[in-house]
Amino acid sequence: MADLQNAFEQASKDIQGLSERPDNDTLLRLYALYKQGSEGDVKGDKPGFFDFVGTAKYEAWAKLKGTAQADAQKKYVDLVKKLTA
């Protein structure tokens, strides 16, 4: 488990060094997996209708509700590896 946590933390650093910005869908996926892996299920109220970015992030994270934090961390690490390869 400590190895997965270390890989997750390293992946969150590695993603900062990408040479080109991923598309919006990939960014939302990264955000949702990171939040699920670090905090668990979505918390708080959904942002207001005119907060389009906040709403998209909230909904992406909410789709992962019930996913184990370890599973989300593994998927995040795998996605970052694919993007940095």
Image (cartoon, grey):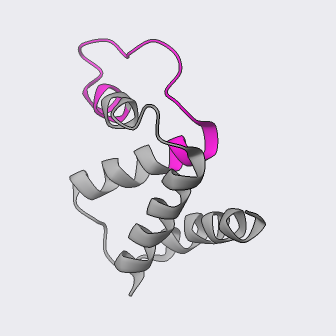
Quarter-of-image position of residue 60: top left
Observer-nearest residue: 57 or 63?
Answer: 63
User: Which residue of the protein is positioned furthest toward the bottom in this rendering?
Assistant: 85
Whether 49 is drawn above or below 40: the answer is above
Whether 78 is drawn above or below 61: the answer is below
Q: Position of residue 33 (x, y in %)?
A: 45, 49
Observer-nearest residue: 14 or 75?
Answer: 75
Q: Position of residue 46 (x, y in %)?
A: 38, 15
Quarter-of-image position of residue 21: bottom left
Residue drawn at the location 22% of the way across and 60% of the way down = 23
Q: Quadrant of the N terminus?
A: bottom right
Observer-nearest residue: 33 or 25?
Answer: 33
Q: Quadrant of the C terminus?
A: bottom left
**Is residue 10 rendered to the left or right of residue 72?**
right
Q: Position of residue 12 (x, y in %)?
A: 57, 63
The magenta region covers 34-57
